[in-house]
Image: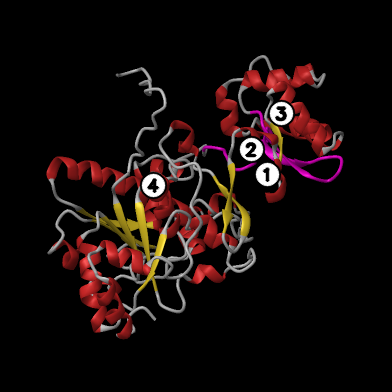
Amino acid sequence: MSGTQQSKAPGTTPPLPLDGVRVMDFSRLLPGPWATQMLSELGADVVKIEQPGIGDPSRQNHPKFHEESVYFHLVNGNKRSITLNLAKPEAAPVIRRLLARADVIIESYRPGVARKLGIDYASVAAYNPRVIYGSVTGFGQTGPMAHVAGHDLVIQGMTGHMARAMTPGTPPPVPGFQAGDFAGALMTVIGVQAALTQREKTGVGNELDISMFEALLHMCPIPLTSAIARLAGHSGEPAQEVFGRNPRYATYLTQDQKPVAVSLLETKIWSDFCVNIGRPDLIAADETPADRLTAHGERAPAYHAALARYCAGHTWAQIQAHMIKTGLAVCTIASPDEALAQAHVIERGMLEYIDHPREGRIPHLVNPLARAGLARRTHRPAPMLGEHTDDVLGEAGYSAAEITALRAARIFE
């Protein structure tokens, strides 16, 4: 019903959105594996096809639990793994049978590689016209940069947002977050869900050409505002300010030399903060939202000095406690360990633990949609290399004798 939350029958669990959807995952590293893990969290059965003897290279990333990469476990939960040497002719009928049963295929090869392997969209759609086929690359399947390796730093540098935080003559620091990778991953998940919905109406699949560059560029309306204005014949000035030149939206150091982030942009919030710290003299009765565009002009030095003094006069823990008490956003900048230890993370259930047969008790991050019953809360462990080969082949109709014969052809090793 519109505007209301439908009630669940007592004692029942509704199906997940992608229950019954089969995903064949040829992707490696990031963003493909994170996207397919999210599809699995939404209910899909994800089968990861890996190179025999090597598998996804991220299995070797540091740090590790006992044996395998923490990162690999964080982006490959819920999946099943099979090994298959796609270069061997004997593998062709096997992969065809598997892909004929697929609802979704995700691959992250360089443009042209999937076609050489005979698993590109045109080849698969010829015998599986309902398939939804997602190719995830740095710059897409066409265009003058299609051949460029899609590393996140290159993607971020090309979108314009890194330059907005750059001091002239000094290169910006390497970002600490893989925005391009995760933008591509999210666009992949959105595209797959949209294509599945469209397929219900049309009966046919879709080819998704996912470019990390396009996905991140699409997420940059704020850093691109001035450039967009200039395309329309305007000056683009004053520029929208979101990059730390506003003293009320910046970072400072505490008494114990730890960083904090100040986010006191709105007039009322700034006034509440000033009253709370005993500095009502910093409240400007004539302040307007437009003052933010100029970073508060001549008042900026006084604001900066007051905020620096406040932060330097309190410890990191005191500032965190003050934020929780007042709701005023002067917050601690947490290390990764501190971030996971926050009471808010624990109370909201953002971490879950699973028992792995070889790695022991290990944590994973919980999909935020689990709270609404739209995603699995607890992951199955990330698969060992080739762990489910026989199971997946059996589901495709191969007998035990046929699987033995295929093993003799050495297509799984």
Select label 1 or label 4 by which is in front. Answer: 1
* Quarter of the rendering containing residue 347: top right
Tags 3 and 1 touching, CB below 8 Å? no
Q: What's the amino acid at mark 3? A: Arg
Farthest residue, direction bottom: 409
Mark 4 nearby-residue class (10 Å; few <14, some 14–19, many ≥20)? few
Instruction: Check disc 1 and report the residue beneath it.
Output: 339
Question: Looking at the image, is mark 1 or mark 2 earlier in the sequence?
Answer: 1
Q: What's the amino acid at mark 2? A: Val
Select label 3 or label 4 by which is in front. Answer: 4
Q: Is residue 281 above or below residue 33?
A: above
What residue is at 63 percent from the left and 34 percent from the top? Answer: 295
Farthest residue, direction front: 401
Quarter occupied by the C terminus? bottom left
Mark 3 nearby-residue class (10 Å; few <14, some 14–19, many ≥20)? few
Q: Which residues are magenta?
A: 240-264
